[in-house]
Image: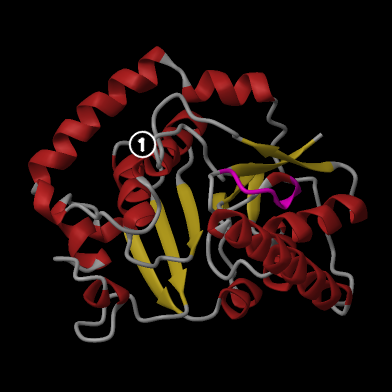
Amino acid sequence: MTHLKAALADLINRRRSIRDQSQQLKEIARLPIEADALRCVTRRELSDRLDSAQTHGDWSQTETDLLAGCPIEDLITDGVNPGDRRALWYLVKSFGARSVLEVGTNVGASTFHLAAALKSSVGDDKPRLVTVDIEDVNHEETGVWKSRNLLSSPEEMIRKIGTRELVTFVHDTSLRYLEGCSETFDLVFLDGDHTATNVYQEVSLSLKLLNRDGIILLHDYFPRNRPLWKGNFPRVGPYLALSRVRKENPRITVLPFNELPWPTKLGTKKTTLALVTRR
């Protein structure tokens, strides 16, 4: 009976959140949704990139190098789960991204893996990662890493693997940064404020910052806003925001990963990662 009451309460809260965020999203004026720069990625291509023997081999060596350069007790155990972090590394490597924008640094779990992937990328131009957060993530007293009792700040983590010169930390709101940004990127990873209004605006602004055949990656995207794990309350904003984006520009679609070839969390391979792609 207690379990049923909890499930019912979750359902009511989810519906309330969907209702409230849907209303707030309607109040946002329509923004430009430009699809020309987006890469067209099929499910077959995504599957091949995540299950490449070459990339698996590269990852095994990188994982060994990361552990050698950063003691296991220092590795981040919070933030984006280990399976999703590995997927980020695979995407940067397999798509050959040289410039990455991350919205939502938090404790630096994803930052660490994005930087590691860029370190080994090949190209004439210097790889770069810009990571934006509303908090001062590296602050010695107020940084999230401190409150989570982690041993190292995001900046210290990437320094330990020799990638500090590749990464720029920005302390700002996502929308203010995106609106004023004059750089362009091969990959934009949106994992900040997950409200529908913010994600809608972030996607619109990110589309303008993409290099040709660039990709936008979402985290916490729950198809049809249904839980992926038992007892897990989905973040409803990303799905609502992308539903509006797709309605306003039918050339844009969303490709949920659904599952990865390796474990993610709670004994499953399920993931909330999703690509914003062009039909």
Q: Quadrant of the N terminus?
A: bottom right
Q: Residue furthest front?
A: 1
User: As drawn, is 231 to the left or to the right of 19?
Assistant: left
User: As drawn, is 156 to the left or to the right of 109?
Assistant: left
Where is residue 146? Give x, y as percent: 22, 76
> What residue lies at 62% left-to-right and 61% top-to-bottom?
5
Where is residue 216? Give x, y as percent: 62, 49
Q: Is residue 234 magenta?
A: no
In the depicted view, which residue is nearer to us: 262 or 95? 262
In the depicted view, which residue is nearer to us: 234 or 66? 234
Residue 167 versus residue 217 in the image, above or below: below
> What residue lies at 38% left-to-right and 67% top-to-bottom?
106
Magenta: main secondary structure: loop
Q: Quadrant of the C terminus?
A: top right
Residue 81 versus residue 204 in the image, above or below: above
User: As drawn, is 220 to the left or to the right of 141?
Assistant: right
Q: Residue furthest bottom?
A: 141
Q: What segment is highlighted magenta in the picture?
A: 224-228
In the depicted view, which residue is nearer to us: 142 or 186? 142
Does residue 235 appear in the picture of this structure? Answer: no
- The amino acid beneath tag 1 is Ser
Q: Could you tell me which secondary element the residue under label 1 belongs to?
A: loop
To which residue does mark 1 refer?
121
> What residue lies at 66% left-to-right and 75% top-to-bottom?
179
